[in-house]
Amino acid sequence: MAGGETVLCSARATVMIYDDTNKKWVTSGSGPNTYSHVQLLHRPAAGAFRVVARKMQPDQQVVMNCALARGLRYNQATASFHQWRDARQVWGLSFCTREDAAAFATAMQGALGVWGGALVLQLPLQGPNSGKSAR
């Protein structure tokens, strides 16, 4: 975590990236498929937010470092799988518990609301269109 950042929420989840070529979700990073420690961070001085995830293994590989941008749509595809799109890709988080998912969604809604009332969408997304719907 960089200086001046505050942790708004922490959760455990598997970090996924939507592979548009093969039309499927794949885990982010290399090595064993393990849970990651996911944090929503806020830098008040810059009014900036980002999501950072590190694998819960000895090397703590960074598998997500995603700055949140104005207009981002955060989708709760299911009670425990949430997704959004940044400029490069579609991210997905498969949370360990529904409680972690709900807490993270609430924190994201608060962060996005700072930029003018962005909503957390609850859409029944599935299959290859799920990545495209997060736009």
Image (cartoon, rainbow, N blue to C red):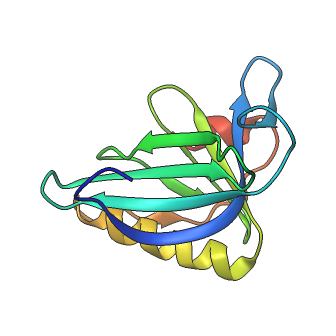
Looking at this view, is 125 or 3 the one in front?
A: 3
Q: Is residue 70 above or below residue 96?
A: above
Measuring 47% from the left and 36% from the top, which residue is drawn there? 86
Q: x%, y% of residue 42?
A: 30, 60
**Count of numbered tags:** 0
Looking at this view, is 118 or 102 the one in front?
A: 102
Q: x%, y% of residue 120?
A: 48, 65
Looking at this view, is 85 or 40 the one in front?
A: 40
Measuring 71% from the left and 34% from the top, which residue is drawn there? 29
Measuring 59% from the left and 41% from the top, which residue is drawn there? 62
Q: Is residue 32 left or right of residue 28?
A: right
Q: x%, y% of residue 128?
A: 78, 34
The furthest residue to the front = 58
Q: Which quadrant of the figure has residue 96?
A: bottom right
Q: Is residue 12 left or right of residue 114?
A: right
Q: Is residue 79 left or right of residue 68?
A: right
Measuring 25% from the left and 54% from the top, which residue is drawn there? 3
The furthest residue to the bottom = 99
The furthest residue to the top = 21
Q: x%, y% of residue 53?
A: 58, 51
The furthest residue to the right = 32
Q: Is residue 48 left or right of residue 38?
A: left
Q: Is residue 127 above or below residue 118?
A: above
